[in-house]
Amino acid sequence: VMHMDEPPRDQTDAEYMASLSDAFLYLAICRGGEAVGRSIVMPGWGDVMTDQEIKDLVAWIRTFSDT
């Protein structure tokens, strides 16, 4: 069983989220955590979600922190 060595960061933290570009979030969702130097436990969703669905998810995540 795989587990995260470090828990995910707080996506409601505006300062932290402002430091992440939409391209970074897109790549993390599309190709997984390893693609952006993060946990290999986070899978990529690019084979499951469409390009537009990933963009919509990035926009929705941004609402958590108003960034």
Image (cartoon, rainbow, N blue to C red):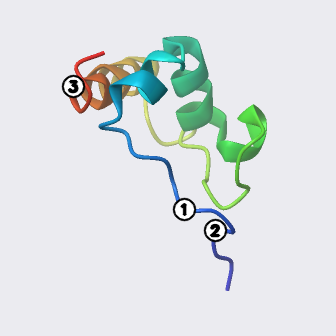
Left or right position of 40 against 18: right
Q: Secondary structure at mark 3?
A: helix
Contact (Cβ within 8 Å) of mark 1 with mark 2? yes
Amino acid at circle 2: Met
For label 1, the residue is 7
Q: Position of residue 2 (x, y in %)?
A: 68, 78
**One can see residue 46 in this view:** no
Q: Is residue 22 above or below residue 58?
A: above
Q: Position of residue 27 (x, y in %)?
A: 62, 26
Instruction: Return the residue at label 3.
Output: 63
Q: Residue 18's x, y, as percent?
A: 44, 16
**Which quarter of the rendered picture does the N terminus lie within?**
bottom right
| Element at label 2 | loop
Q: Position of residue 61 (x, y in %)?
A: 31, 31
Q: Quadrant of residue 20?
A: top right
Q: Can you identify the residue that label 2 sits on?
A: 4
Query: Which mark's residue is nearer the viewer, 1 or 3?
Result: 1
Give left or right: position of 21 versus 37.
left
Q: Nearer the viewer, residue 49 or 15?
A: 15
Q: How many numbered marks does the figure carry?
A: 3
First of labels 1, 3 by sequence position:
1
Give the spatial CA distance, label 3 vs label 2: 25 Å
Which of the 4 image quarters holds residue 35? Answer: top right
Dot 1: element: loop
